[in-house]
Amino acid sequence: MWMVEIPPFVPFFICALIAAVARGVWRSATMVAIPIISAFHLWMVPEGIHLQFAFLDYQLILYRVDKLSLMFGYVFHIAALIAIIYSLHVRDTKQQVAAMLYVGSGLGAVFAGDLLTLFVFWELLAFTSVFLIWARRTRRSYVAGMRYLIIQVLSGVILLVGALFYVAENGTLEFGHIGLDGIAGWLIFISFGIKCAFPIAHNWLTDAYPEATVTGAVFLCSVTTKVAVYALARGYPGTELLVYIGAAMTCFPIFFAVIENDLRRVLSYSLINQVGFMVVGIGIGTALSINGAISHAFNDVIFKGLLFMSMGAVLHMTGRINGSDLGGLYKTMPKTTVLCIIGAASISAFPLFSGFVSKSMVMSAALENGYDWIWLILLFASAGVFHHAGIKIPYFAFFAHDSGIRASDPPKNMLLGMLIAAGLCIAIGIYPAALYALLPYDTGYNPYDATHVLAQTQLLFFSALAFVWLNLRGMYPPELRSTNLDFDWVYRRVFPSILQKTFSIIWTINNVLRKAFLVRLYRCLAFLAKKNDRSSVLLSRTYPAGSMVMWVAVLLAIYLLLSFT
């Protein structure tokens, strides 16, 4: 029974300690075994509160299990196993320790039953994940990691302030439905929104993820935003504002992804697009939409991880990731090409692939609840994601033109990780009932009715036709060597420019004041020096030492006389 009370993050933290001291086969074997053992343990844990203790006047719930937290717990274990297998060739202690701590922190967050425990793991997510970016050891990764860390820590600080307001308003720290009724709700909402990559607050993702290591990006795309999705599903289901925020998230990344040259940055924009579908589902708040949001989060971890792994394999074998530098790799990397296409079909929601059985739930819920315009926006976003992730990624990496690069497929462990993810994408698409059985609500939803299949097939067909037509006409945005900025232009260009000009003015004023002060100081010193001329100042004249001693004796005698009178 005591095994039940061990939270899932503990085995991963122990694994991090082992990885810090073990080497070679022992380290690899431990890292592969831990997610498997922990997943089996989690499968046996019943729902309920299993670990709590008193802190001051409040109950801290370290381990709360229900269907919502279990869904994210399962997929984090699956993602960890796949990413660990994919990274077995890596010999970097810092990166491997950080990865284990990062996954453990994500698990700690989704099983936290109170806001204070959530805050602790929320910040641990930031501090552990940044090392997966810095581990690339380039100037760009260091600077991007610093920006990432600042924004992530800011999110945690806002969460802590919101939690303090929440406990003052409600007298409890329990993490349940929060809503937007008071200042606490808004602060916590903003904190969740930053980590969820809401519009305007999203640039940490597109800035940092492409600069992470090949294997680090696979871990990153699986945990951080999904923890935020879980937090929104726990605290803000049915909040209508989320419907409109999510709709915006599905649309605006499309335009940046289409013109982006860095293919891992394309996937980062695509990640925001997919999270937008989840946010819409949470905002609608019905059983069907919540199921759709959670199942799509589950599937996105797998197929987005597969796409990041395939592009990571390209980067690992060629040293290049820009679409303008790649092409023709299907000739020498056929296995990677096929696996990438499976990931592209999944994210594009092709029938019989995992994305189809979850994305359609959110869109159906939007129609059923009168969000017709939102449904049209989601339809447009579905076509857009097929363009930039379903077609652009495999096309420009493997087919567009012959770049002359003759790289082979990556090491077997990388292929095995991608193969497991690809197998899950197909298995879930063919047999969605296994996934639906884990969801919080039983809705009896069937994704494979004629209407859904026909509508999605038509959408994909005409979207592909549009891509071919635009490409043949030379109207599709070409892959150019460039750096594209969106809202991060504000803090990467505007703020530095304003600060530079501000400090330039400050230093100019400082120099003027310093010069004026020094001029007056020198004049004052000159005046004193003139007054202190030995020929004109009485006090500066020299006197014999004997006369000075006599005057001291006289003063002492006068003092003694006065003291005895």
Image (cartoon, grey):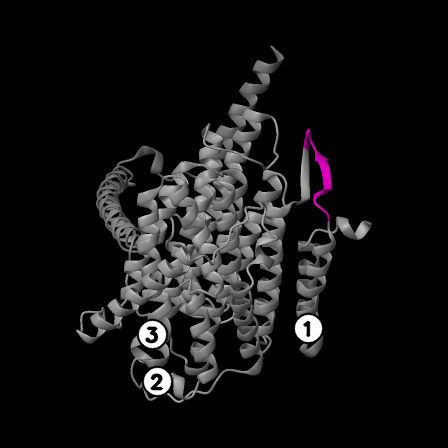
Which numbered circle lies on residue 27?
A: 1
Label 3 is placed on what type of residue? Asn
Q: Position of residue 316 (x, y in %)?
A: 46, 79
- Looking at this view, name the residue that lies furthest to the top: 565
Q: Name the residue under label 2.
A: 328
Residue reaching furthest to the right = 1
Depth check, front residue: 136 or 321: 321
Circle 1: residue type: Arg
Image quadrant for the C terminus? Answer: top right
Point out residue 261 in the picture as x, y percentages from the top left corner. 30, 70
Mark 1 surroundings within 10 Å by alpha-carbon count, few (fewer than 14), some (14 through 19), many (20 or more):
many
Q: What residue type is disc 2 on? A: Gly
Magenta stretch: give its range.
46-58
Front in this rendered view, residue 441 or 105:
441
Which numbered dot is residue 322? Answer: 3
Looking at the rendered image, the disc whose residue lies closer to the viewer, 2 or 1, is: 2
Q: Which residue is at a point 18% across and 73% down the rendered structure image?
A: 474
* Neighbourhood count class around disc 3 (C-alpha, 10 Å): few under 14, some 14–19, many 20 upward: many
